Image (spheres, rainbow, N blue to C red):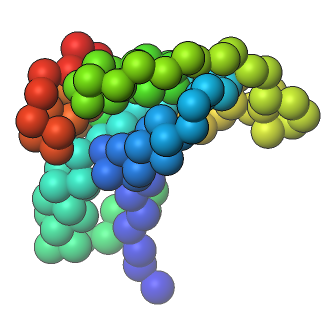
Amino acid sequence: MPWTTLRAAQFHELTLTLVRKMSALPVIPAPGGMRLEPVDGREVAARLAALALAAPAGLVPDLAGPQVYALGELIRSYLRATGRRRLLMPVRMPGSAGRAYRQGANLSLPGATRGIRTWGQFLTDQVGHPASA
């Protein structure tokens, strides 16, 4: 059976949920070496629609956000945008999962398509204040 698969990075909405939950803590553990490249869900939807209307293409290039961020950067930008202050405590993620994140195994493959809408633009739309990430 012919098929097409699109791998997409973490959506902005998932990233926002993650940083919101973490920011509720009085001290935020910030896993060192953990990077994300959040992508706008609308851009993923548009790409999926275009792929669905096209001929099967197998595994197509990943779709990721326009920039790679350290998780600590994403948390700090959310705190700034919401006017909150929290202490970030660097932690080292142990084991093979931690090693995989530090090596960037969760990031898109070479040749990925990059979205346009940044995390900062998304965050500003969500919280109503500029974020500088």
Quick one: 58 or 23, which is closer to the camera?
23
Please identify the quarter of the rendering in which residue 125 is found.
top left
Residue 41, horizontal then vertical, whole percent: 24, 54
Q: Residue at x 55, y 17 (%)?
A: 87
Q: Residue at x 26, y 30 (%)?
A: 82
Q: Residue at x 21, y 21 (%)?
A: 131
Please identify the quarter of the rendering in which residue 115 is found.
top left
Q: Is 54 placed left or right of 61 in the picture? A: left
Q: Is 111 placed left or right of 43 in the picture? A: right
Please state the total of marks drawn on the protein image. 0
Quick one: 70 or 50, which is closer to the camera?
70
Whether residue 61 is visible? no
Please identify the quarter of the rendering in which residue 90 is found.
top right
Q: Is residue 43 above or below residue 34?
A: below
Residue 72, horizontal then vertical, whole percent: 51, 20
Whether residue 48 is visible? yes
Q: Residue furthest bottom?
A: 1
Q: Is residue 7 above or below residue 77?
A: below
Q: Residue furthest right?
A: 95
Quick one: 9 or 84, which is closer to the camera?
84
Q: Which quadrant is the C terminus positioned in?
A: top left
Residue 23, horizontal then vertical, whole percent: 47, 36
